[in-house]
Structure formats: structure tokens, C-alpha cells
Image (spheres, rainbow, N blue to C red):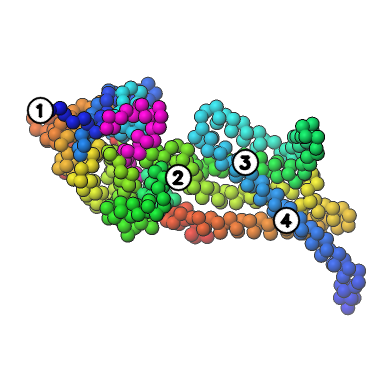
Amino acid sequence: MTEPRPLLEVSRVTRVIDGKKILDDVSLSLNKGDLKVVIGPSGGGKSTLLQCVNFLQVPNQGDVFLDGVSAREMSRHNINLFRQKIGMIFQDFNLFDHLSARDNVAIALRKVKGQKKAKAYQRAMEELDRVGLADKADLYPSQLSGGQKQRVSLARALAMDPMVMLLDEPTSALDPELIGEVLNVIAQLSYSGMTMLMVTHQIGFARHLTKEIIFMEAGRVVETGPPELLEGGPGGGRAAEFCAKLAEVTGR
Amino acid sequence: MDFFKNLFSPEILRAITDFSQSALFIAQGSGYTVALIALAMLLGLILGLPLSTITVYGPGWLKKLTGLYVWFFRGVPILVLMFLIYFGFFDLIESFYFKLFEERLVLTPFKAAVLSLGLASAAYQSQIFKGAILSVQSGQLKAALALGFSKKRAIIHVILPQALRISIPAWSNEYSILLKDSAIAYVLGTMEIMARTRFMASTTFAHIRFYLFAGLLYFVLTWLGVKLLAVLDKKVRIPGLAHDVFRAED
Ligand SMILES: Nc1ncnc2c1ncn2[C@@H]1O[C@H](COP(=O)(O)OP(=O)(O)OP(=O)(O)O)[C@@H](O)[C@H]1O
Ligand SMILES: [Mg+2]
């Protein structure tokens, strides 16, 4: 029996900015339904990696394959089609300030997918309902709490029916009491089979949901393994060391 | 009381009716002035918006070109521009047109004034829009691209709607400046407020009276326009955004 083809494959990606290797020969792959967690110290290249996956930053070397389709090949024709299939969640939400929650979710359906307003709105309401914000549909981003904003941005990404979700520290701009509501949505998503690559420092959360932790430092994948990787103990590697430090800081 | 007798003497009464007729003649120039700056501001908007977008997002060589445009039209006095366009550019077009079609094409002073004010305003407006575009949080463009928007469509649907809203107060300022710049158009012989005022003043020698009246007209037009834009600003304001809170105080 052969391994199934990975849904998302990052193949030997190198990214150089100003002569500095921000990403150095990074490879990883996700099968359908996987949730993999990327951790590592600040400046290690985690955000850059995620942005290379949907070619918001074009890797200098290497390629990304989504369901076997090459991003580099797509970027010669229409990279926007490739990006449509990959949802992205940002640390600071990046909601469109001039649009209500409903329109934030609907705008890409209308302007990218060309759907009629009524259809897009119906889908937007379904997605807002999924993240528990149906009653906030008419509010604008600046009238929402951080946790609500992030949930709207999840709804916005999900409405596009992505094959994969990239999440870049989705909870690190949130007050502690708001983190739970966002993590809940992400956990639900994972249970329902969504394929996700997530950068987070929520080690406890990661431990429960992921099969694999990817530890990045200085642009390289240093360690990869199951969550026990983080437990440390004698012979604990860099990842365990990092986690111990993190626990010291957060008191967990 | 001699004073009151004099006040209602036939001469003064005639002077008053004369003045109100002349004033009416001058006030009718408001139509020209308003049309002139409405068209000039529109031209400035139509040119200024792409200019600013290119200045922020365009490739390097195009940025240089827009920089050159802004540098030129901000540097040349509006009066010089009007003469250049009316006596240089328009003459050129007219003679070309005549050679091509054996027909006269009449380019009016009014059109030259609109073009001069509009081209200059485009330079200033592009700077207003540029600042507004830069003040829209750049993560929003990234988010739009990640959703599958092309860069052009992301700019049109996400960045510019916000930038235009932010621009309204500065735009209102540009209106009041342009309105007063439009007074220079009298040199080409457009029948706007200033041209009429000069005509009346120089035929009756009642300079102070007429220029004060013209000043009053400009004042009212400025006030009206600024008020109108403030209403627009309020109407399109994004609920809950920071500037909303700050300005709620006034
Ligand atoms: N546009 C850029 N120009 C120059 N250097 C950059 C640029 N973007 C990122 N870098 C550098 O690349 C490195 C990796 O940045 P990146 O944001 O990917 O790190 P990160 O792991 O996400 O860090 P954090 O945990 O703080 O978010 C950093 O050293 C950063 O200074
Ligand atoms: Mg980061």
C-alpha cells in the first residue's frame, strides 16, 4: 500500500531577504485532516514560512504543492486561484475596517468568486453562525472584541471553502480570557477534518490536538515529532528547552 | 433731520437699486465659479486617484513619472498654467484640428480654466490620497490577497474605499483652496465671479463695494462646500473607527 499523496507539501523552500536566509531548505507535508503546529523563537521564520505557502512571499528556491498542484507553476498563470484554496488567519486579524462582519465574510465570495449578493450573504451568515457570531453580523470590526474579530476572520476564510488553513499565532494578540473562544473554533474545525498548519505558543492546546510539532529556529526545521517532543526530561532537545522557557514565562 | 432726508434721497435710492442690479449680475457668476471648480475637482479626482495609487503601489519607473507630474504641477503657478494651456496648448490643438478636418474647433477659456485647475488639483489631490492609502493598515491588503483577490481588485475593493473616506477632510480643504484659485480664471475672460466684479468695479469706480461683495460670495461658497463635505463625511463614516470618536466632540 502506498502512502496517500499529501494534501499540502512544502518542498525545500528557501527564502532570502537582503542576502539573509530567512528560510533555509524547509520541507514539510500535511495529509488531509492533519493539524500540525509550528513553534519556535521569535524571528525564526514561522510567519515567513506561512506566507511562502500561499506565495504571499515567493520562495527563492523550492516549491509548494496543494493537492499535487505546483504553486510556482500557478504563479506563472494566476496565483490568485491557488491562494483562494488556502485560508489564512493573521495574528492581528486584518479585517476590512470599512465593512460589517457580514460584508467582511461576503466580499471575497462576491468579488473573487463572483457570487450574487444574496447567495454570498446567505453563506456569510452560515459561517458567522458557525463561529457563534450570527448576532454580530451588522457590527463593524472596531465594534468587536479581539476574540470576535478573530472569529470573523475565521468565518471569512472558511467561506471560501479552503482545502487548507494557515494560522499565524491566531491568539497571541488576544487577552487571556478571549483566547478560549478562538481556540474552541479552531478545535472544532480540526475535529471536522480541516487540514491546518498553525503557528502558536499555546503549547497546552497544541499538545491535545496535534500529532506533530514542528520546531523552527533560525529559518530551519530543527526538530519534528509528536507532542511528547516538548516534554523534555533528560535528553530533551531544543524544542523541550524552548517549551520549558515558555512555561516559565507564562506560568504553565 | 437732514441725515434721514439724505438717506432716502432719490440719488441714494437709485444707487441702491443700481448696486443690487450689479450685485445680481456678479452673483450670477457663482454658477460659472461653481461649475468651474466642480469640474476641476472632478478632473483632479479622476487623475489624482490613479496617480496616488501608482505612487504607492506602482513599479519604480512609473513612480518616477508620477513624481515628475506632481513636481511640475505643484511648481508652476496657476496663472502661468492657464496661459500655457489657453494660448499654447489650445492654440496647438485648434490649428491641428483645422488642418485635419478643415473645420474650426473652439476651445473656450472656460475649458482652459477647468483643465488648468484640474491638472494642478490632481497633483495636490494625489498627495492627499497617497497619505490616506498609506494610513490604511497594510495587513488588509495581505488578507485580501490571501483570499484570492488580485492586487488591483484588492486595492479597488479594500484599500481605496477606506482611503477615500479618510481623504474627505483634506479634500474639503482642497476645495476651499481651489475655489479661491478659481478667481484667477478671470484673466482668460471666463464670466465667473471675479471677471464680473472687475467689470463692475472698473465701470462704476465703486471698487470697495464690489470687491467686498465678491469676497462675501466666495466666503458663502466656501462655507457651503465645506458644510456639504462635512455632511458627506458624516454619512460615510465607518462606525466605531477611532477618528469617529475624536471628531464626535466638535
Ligand atoms: N520584509 C523583511 N525584510 C527584512 N527582513 C525580514 C522581513 N520580513 C521578515 N524579516 C526577517 O525574517 C526573520 C523571520 O521573520 P518571521 O516574521 O518569519 O519570524 P517569526 O518566526 O514569525 O517571528 P515571530 O514569532 O516574532 O512572529 C526575522 O529575522 C525578520 O527580521
Ligand atoms: Mg510571526
The span from disc 1 to disc 4 (Cα, nearest Å) is 86 Å
Q: Which mark is residue A235?
A: 1
Label 2, label 1: how far apart the Cα atoms are: 51 Å
Q: Is mark 2 within 8 Å of ligand 1?
A: no
Task: Name the residue that disc number 2 marks.
Answer: B158
Disc 4 target residue: B31
Q: Is residue B84 visible?
A: no
Amino acid, disc 1: Gly
User: What is the CA distance from the residue labelled 2 to the residue labelled 3?
Assistant: 22 Å
SS class, disc 3:
helix
Q: How many marks?
A: 4
- Dot 2 falls on a residue whose secondary structure is helix
The answer for how far apart the CA atoms under marks 4 and 3 are is: 22 Å
User: Mark 1 CB in 8 Å range of ligand 1?
Assistant: no
What residue span does the magenta drawing correspond to? A66-93
Check disc 3 and give the amino acid type. Answer: Ala
Marks 2, 1: nearer the viewer: 2
- Return the chain for callout 3: B
